[in-house]
Amino acid sequence: MELERVGYSTFVQSFDFRPGTDFVHRMQHATATSGRTIAVLSPAYLGSAFGEAEWRTAFARDPSGEHGLLLPVRIEPCEPPGMLATRVYVDLVGVTEAVAREKLLAAVDRNPSRPTTAAYPGGHRATADGDTEPARFPGRPSPDRGRAVPHELPSDVPDFVGRGAEIRTLLAALGPGRRGTGGVSVVAVYGPPGVGKTALAVHAGHRLVEAFPDGQLYADLRGNLTEPGDPGEALAAFLRAFGLRDGDIAESLDERAARYRSLLHGRRVLVVLDNAADERQIRPLLPGAPTAAVLITARAAPVGIDGALPVALDPLPPAAAARLLRHIAGPRARGLSDQARQIVEHCGRLPLAVRIAGARLLVDPHLDARSYSELLADESRRLDELSIGDRAVRASVNVSYAALEPVQQYVFRLLGSIGPVTFAPWLATALAGLDAPRAEAALRGLVRAQLVQAARDGRYRLHDLVRLFAAERAAEAGDDERRAAVRRAADACCGLVERINARVLPAGDGGVTADARTPEDALAQFRTERETLLTLAERLAAPDTADAAWRLVVLLPALLQMVGDWTGWQRVTRAVLTAAAGSGDDYAYARVLLGWAAVRREKGALDEAADSYRRAHDLLEAAGDTDWQAQALAGLGAVRREQGRMADAAATLDAAIALFRRCGNRRGEALALSNLGTTLLNQGQDSAAEEAFRDSRATFESLGDRRWVAYCLGDLADLYGRRGSWAEAGDHQERALAILRAYDDQLGIARSHGHLAEIRQAEGRYDRAVEHALAGLRIVTDLGAPLERARSLERLAGLCERTGDPEGAARYRHELTTSQRPAE
């Protein structure tokens, strides 16, 4: 073999070398750079008596070779024997190359702690054709005495918690049992700022020390700073750690990297590259042999490093984050589990933030967990409160922000305007006012910088603390930029909701094309975007953007009713209603007030709903908007029916139908007819009710609205039930339920279950009646619909009485009386 192939540095001199030249210098240089030397010596030197003094000077630490620092090799006969009589040596005279290779390796393995420098002060270069791999040097018990063995890992984190799965992955990939493919093992831990990448790497490094007895190298590459570290400087530091003098370290990066790889060849060394910036910084620092291993931390996964195992790091689980806080804060956090949980959630379970919070509690005698949790609850000052000494969440995130390209910074700070939601690329495109390719490219850059998190469903989100940082940057950029961005976003949201409404609530004109192919797809799309739409509408509820807020919120009620989100509907409508009232725009206020009346009706606050519908009607009448005036009357008529005021309800609904017909709103007319039919049925006018139901159903069928066709089938089922035609009633209600399930209309499904419970009870099928009643109760409980829940409980109490279960009846009636009536 050529010794260079297994990592030896070689020093070749002419064959006629004679004592008295540069032997001492060459040998001292060899031992300084490696510590163990193979000396392939010429016969002239070995046979000379003059070499003794030089020999002792060159190998002053081990002149006889008994410590393994010197391995003399003879490749040609020598007469007289000279120094060979007093030294252990490897005699390769007259042997084949294969035997020479085996004898040399066997001699090296007698004291095999480090790779060996081969010095050639005379004679031929030792070569052999066989392939010798570093695997010939396994199981080294300890480094040689006198050799530099770097132990550069920073101290382990004393209060390290969690990360069990990640630790197991690192130990399996880098530890003694790792499975290699002939290359160096590389693991890259990546994640957002403050997630604990360095702590994990250092902790794992200390767990791996025994597997790497030849040393542990550590370099902070400062990739998290504006000016990342120079890999050449890191290489120089590594070479010095193994004993090289500055004068022996080459100037060029390539030469340093080559020397570094040669030095590490065959050695079991762990290299920790912390805070790496990118692949260009990492590549020169990778060893060349599989005996070494590399652990990288970076904010972005270094995907360009072949064979690197990426390990993503997320915020800590809640229990581990709370445990970390208690470890750091000590007695100040004990016995306050609720406050501790709140604090770690305000910290987003980010280890850096949790550590800062724990330290604040520990050192500030005037700050307790309860008051600190209250301070952190205020988003406007949360980042101020997450700072202590030289540690600050804001500073950590700012490093990544400062390294972004200008367009990435622009998109990032605008994303702080939309609140704590997931979002699709179309929203980022609208916010930024960019074309889709540029906006999506900026998003990809933000993901790589770990400032935006990508989900598998193609959506994105910002960690809460990162979002607050983005909002601060947006505030610095000025109100004009933010206001223009959120208006663009509002316009895009309105367009999306209009397209979804056109699919889910078709008007029959065929003039609107939705993104989704079917009504069911459109409703599924709304479910995905719902929280983003509501949060943006709430954010828009400010004096300077109230007009954008009301334009969006008035499009949502029908869809929110379908998905049963009364809590979100009420929260956002209240906020926008307040903004609209302060804007002085009566028309906007009236339109939002209609939505408020509808949600209060669903919450069971019928008197408040009726008052809101009346006020909205008066304002809309003054504005001359006949269509929405009719909507207000239709809503008021439905409330009057639910209040038991049937005559008032019928008169109000007749007036609404007349207005709808005047303005040509067929959908509004059909909805009012359905409500009128129910009112007439309650008045005992079965024939008139049936006519209203059939007219309503025919209109919805002509509009292509299968969902409302299902409601009309339910209305007809009630009619047939009143007539005692239970089989026909059950058939109509089962058909309605099947359609509503296809739409995943939870409220409609719950109501259909309730009607089926009544039908099956009338048929004497009590087991099926109870099943339907319980199914409906579960749904309306989950939806938070108190009026429908009260009806379900009353229905179940009656069923229990009919089936001889007075205890069950009492239990449901007790729950009915103790349930909260209507929500605030």
Image (cartoon, grey):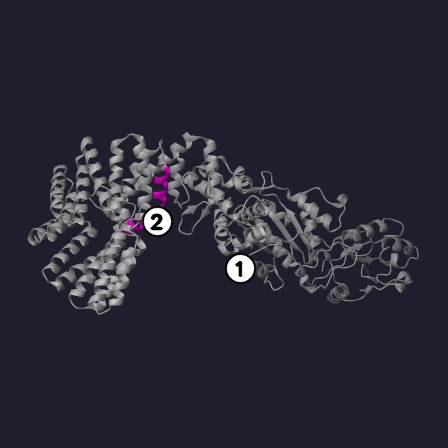
Question: Whole-percent x and y of residue 180?
Answer: 59, 61
Task: Specify the amino acid type for callout 1.
Answer: Ala
User: Which residue matches tag 1?
Assistant: 165
Q: Visible in this render: residue 687?
A: yes
Residue closer to the observer: 571 or 806: 806
Q: Quadrant of residue 158?
A: bottom right
**Main SS type for the magenta part?**
helix
69 is within the stretch colored magenta: no
Q: Is disc 2 surrounded by few (<14), some (14 to 19) or many (20+) residues within 10 Å?
A: some
Residue closer to the observer: 676 or 98: 676
Question: Whole-percent x and y of residue 236?
Answer: 70, 45
Local secondary structure at mark 1: helix
Distance in Å between CA atoms under marks 1 and 2: 31 Å
Q: Residue at x 73, y 48 (%)?
A: 240
Q: Please report whichever mark, 1 or 2, sits nearer to the chain's N-terminal start.
A: 1
Height in image: 644 above or below 168?
above
Task: Specify the amino acid type for callout 2.
Answer: Thr
Q: Visible in this render: residue 296?
A: no
Question: Whole-percent x and y of residue 568?
Answer: 33, 46
Q: Quadrant of the N terminus?
A: bottom right
Q: Residue at x 35, y 33 (%)?
A: 545
Q: Which mark is residue 528?
A: 2
Local secondary structure at mark 2: helix
Q: Which mark is residue 266?
A: none
Height in image: 783 above or below 224?
below
Q: Where does the magenta region start and end?
A: 520-539
- Answer yes or no: do the residues labelled 1 and 2 have beta carbons within 8 Å? no
Residue closer to the observer: 301 or 79: 301
